[in-house]
Amino acid sequence: MDARRHVALKESIRSIPDYPKPGIIFRDITTLLSDPRAFRRAVDALVHPYAGGRIDQVAGIEARGFILGGAVAHQLSSGFVPIRKKGKLPHKTVSMAYALEYGTDEIEIHVDAINPGDRVVLVDDLIATGGTAMAAVSLLRQAGAEVVAACFVIDLPEIGGAQRLRDLGVPVRTLMEFEGH
């Protein structure tokens, strides 16, 4: 993506200070999603490295990863696998627990969502600590997937989540970075 388009895409993100708590700047992609040109550019940029290759499934992390991942899956002519919080999927599931700042949480996929050997791209809006994304990679691998890459619109590199995914052997693609938390 050329620098002019990159700046325009980054400018489509709304920054909300002190949300959800003081000292945090929330990077809100709903403004990007509501701008048809920015949304299209973001999806095209996420799709581009994998176009023409074999991607069997795109896995999206609840909830904004569903929006982006569905669009990416459509463009790649791939299936879509929703990765949801525990208790939200109606059929038999497999789950993965992961650590939060205080306590743990779990994510799930349907037991029949992945076929062994499926090539999967993981998609979400933002990578911060990487906890949810690392759990998603573990869950997908447990189901037999080959996680080809993880893609995010936004990286918060100071927090280190993208590097944690790379340390797991997952190539990471992000469209932009923001400083801070």
Image (tube, rainbow, N blue to C red):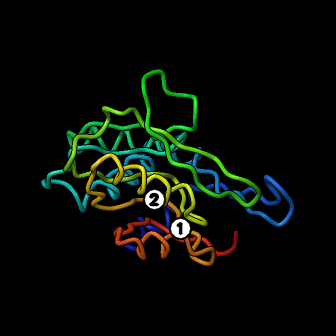
Instruction: Characterize the local packing of mark 2: few (<14), some (14-19) or many (20 or more) Cα atoms within 10 angstroms.
Output: many
Please identify the quadrant where the N terminus is shown.
Answer: bottom left
Q: Residue at x 38, y 47 (%)?
A: 40
- Is 164 placed above or below 143 here? below
Horizontally, residue 71 falls left or right of residue 85, namely left
Q: Secondary structure at mark 2?
A: strand
Q: Residue at x 59, y 46 (%)?
A: 31
Calculate the distance from the C-alpha at mark 2 to the C-alpha at mark 1. 7 Å
Q: What amino acid type should be assigned to the residue bearing mark 1?
A: Asp
**Relative vertical location of residue 49 with respect to residue 60 in this rendering, above or below:** below
Identified by mark 2, the residue type is: Phe
Instruction: Give how far across and how far down residue 85 sits, in percent.
Output: 57, 38
Residue pictured at 53% horizontal, 43% vertical: 107
User: Can you tell which mark lies on residue 155?
Assistant: 1
Looking at the rendered structure, the secondary structure element under dot 1 is strand
User: Does 136 sit left or right of 97 as displayed?
Assistant: left
Q: Residues within 10 Å of mark 1 (few under 14, many from 20)?
A: many
Residue 152 is labelled as: 2
Residue 158 image-quadrant placement: bottom right
Is 151 displayed left or right of 64 in the figure? Answer: left
